[in-house]
Image (cartoon, grey):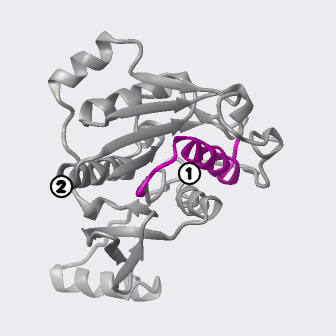
Amino acid sequence: MNIIVCIKQVPNTNEVKINQETGTLIRDGVPSIINPDDKNAIEAALQLREINGGKVTVISMGPPQAKEALKEAYAMGADEVYLVSDKAFGGSDTWATATVLAAVIKKIGNYDIIFCGRQAIDGDTAQVGPEIAEFLDIPQVTYAKYIEDKGKNFVITRKTEGADYIIETSKPVLITAIQDLNKPRYPQVKRIFEVYASNDIVKTWTSEDIPVDLTQIGLKGSPTNVYSSFVPTKEKHSEIIDGTDKNEKAEKLLDKLKAAGVI
């Protein structure tokens, strides 16, 4: 079974700050990580390979430093890792990003399943995975919490807020993973040493290496753009409720909660 996983290196959003003048993320000094849902996607791919054999290929589109995310994916157990990096990709929205990744997948070819994380924590759009499936003209199942391989087909449990859905789909198929799907494994010490001892494990492709229309990628090829971004202002207010005893204080508290529409 040949499996492709698309991952993204993202800033650790617990430490992200926004430049109030430009409205852009301040990435300097902020540690980067593999997008959490993408780790679940990697784990799902590795588990399927352990059962069926085959190969797991992990790809990522991003700047040169995204190699670190791919090195971690290799240390987890991936067979091949590819970085797609080029200044021509800069400013790509989800549509342009999916265009590039679909072109990469077409070039790799011969796949049974594509995994993506449900969504990236820096954008939260959940659009790239489904768009890749549309560009490749293959079935897609999002928000997967359980996957059963039936040979020619997959049976997937899809989680939603209201209920779980059982979906059977043919191969090839694109699946987006959520954290309920599994618990990602730790990287292997042996493979950590291997990936940092070699300069050839992470293969890098540019726009010249993939069959992509340059007018459909990058900032100019993106049909959407971010108008503005900001950090919500957090305000806290407190009030001391006086009373002669606890019953009176409780009654006053209830009155205030009712007036505020809380109860």
Q: Which residue is drawn at 47% across and 39% down?
A: 59
Q: Residue at x 38, y 50 (%)?
A: 3
Disc 2 residue type (three-letter):
Ile
Disc ID at residue 51: 2
Say which label, 2 or 1, has the lower sequence index: 2
159 versus 10 height, above or below: below
Which of the 4 image quarters holds residue 138? Answer: bottom right
Disc ID at residue 207: none
Q: Which of 227 and 222 is in front in this view?
A: 222
Per the rendered image, the range of residues in magenta is: 92-113
Q: Which of 113 and 87 is in front in this view?
A: 113
| Image spot of residue 72 (x, y percent) | 32, 30
196 versus 186 height, above or below: above
Mark 2 element type: helix
The answer to whether 240 appears left or right of 130 in the picture is left
| C-alpha gap between disc 2 and disc 1 | 33 Å
Disc 1 residue type (three-letter):
Gly
Is residue 99 highlighted in magenta? yes
Of labels 2 and 1, the one closer to you? 2
Report the residue marked by disc 1.
123
Q: Which of 238 and 89 is in front in this view?
A: 89
Question: Which quarter of the rendering shows the C terminus?
Answer: bottom left
